């Protein structure tokens, strides 16, 4: 049992160190040796959990996506008003994107939870739901890009503006 626990812990450490590695060096310069070293493990340790570098990077992307799904499910459970819930999910999504550059790399569509919330809110008008989804997706994605480019402040004021704009759109 202890070996299984330590193996799971090492895998978590490797994934976390892999995220830091990509943030520091990018995917092109990703090094499994540096990841292992950051965990205090042998250079062979990553290969006990992953076949190769590509599988490791894919697992990192999945790991980050799972972190977002967990967070978004928690947020969704807190807010009863659907418009407030969608707005809070969107703000959290932007913050998560900024803090986790790998988020979204494994998914070509807008966040599933937010999309489903919008479709449910406008379930009687599919066309309107698609319009709202487009507008909100553009607000969220654009805000994240502008913050990452330094053209918008990463501040409560920006997030309040985004939240209010999303509520107004809904």
Image: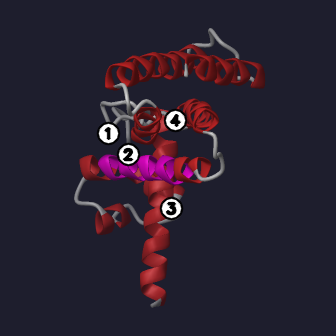
Q: CA distance from mark 3 to mark 2?
A: 15 Å
Q: Which mark is residue 61?
A: 2
Q: Which mark is residue 106?
A: 1
Q: Residue at 42% x, 53% y: name it.
A: 63
- In the image, 165 versus 38, the foreground residue is 165
The residue sitting at the top extreme is 151
Comparing labels 4 and 3, the label whose residue is closer to the camera: 3
- Compute the Cα span from label 2 to label 4: 16 Å
Kindly report which numbered mark, 3 or 2, lies closer to the viewer in this rendering: 2
Which mark, by number, is residue 24?
A: 4
* 1 or 3: tag closer to the N-terminus: 3
- Give the Cα separation between the discs numbered 4 and 3: 16 Å
Tell us which disc is closer to us: 1 or 4. 1
Q: Is residue 115 magenta?
A: no
Ranked by sequence position, the earlier of labels 3 and 2 is 3
Q: Quadrant of residue 154?
A: top right
Q: Position of residue 157 (x, y in %)?
A: 77, 19
* Residue in the image at 65% along x and 45% along y: 79
x, y percentage for residue 139?
Answer: 52, 17
Give the spatial CA distance, label 2 vs label 1: 6 Å
* Quarter of the image with the N terminus in it: bottom left
Write the start and end of the magenta stretch as one range: 57-71
At label 4, counting other C-alpha atoms closer than 10 Å, the crowd grade (few under 14, some 14-19, many 20 or more) is few
Q: Is residue 53 above or below residue 132?
A: below
Residue position for label 3: 13
Tell me what residue is drawn at x 38 percent, y 40 percent: 30
Q: In what element is the residue under mark 3?
A: helix
**Residue that extends furthest to the front in the rendered view of this protein:** 124
Q: Where residue 134 sits: x, y (%)?
A: 40, 18
Q: Secondary structure at mark 4?
A: helix
Of the image marks 2 and 1, the number of the one nearer the N terminus = 2
Identified at 46% across, 38% down, the residue is 117
């Amino acid at each position: 049992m202890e070996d299984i626990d330590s193996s799971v812990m090492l895998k978590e450490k490797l994934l976390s160190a892999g995220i830091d590695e990509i943030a520091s060096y990018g995917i092109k310069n990703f090094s499994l040796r540096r990841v292992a070293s950051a965990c205090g493990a042998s250079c062979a340790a990553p290969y006990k959990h992953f076949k190769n570098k590509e599988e490791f990077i894919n697992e990192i992307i999945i790991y980050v996506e799972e972190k977002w799904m967990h967070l978004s499910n928690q947020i969704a459970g807190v807010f009863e008003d659907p418009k407030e819930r969608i707005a809070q999910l969107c703000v959290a999504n932007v913050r998560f994107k900024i803090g986790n550059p790998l988020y979204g790399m494994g998914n070509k569509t807008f966040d599933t939870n937010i999309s489903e919330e919008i479709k449910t809110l406008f379930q009687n008008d599919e066309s309107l739901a698609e319009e709202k989804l487009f507008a909100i997706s553009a607000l969220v994605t654009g805000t994240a890009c502008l913050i990452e480019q330094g053209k918008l402040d990463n501040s409560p004021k920006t997030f309040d503006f985004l939240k209010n704009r999303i509520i107004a759109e809904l």
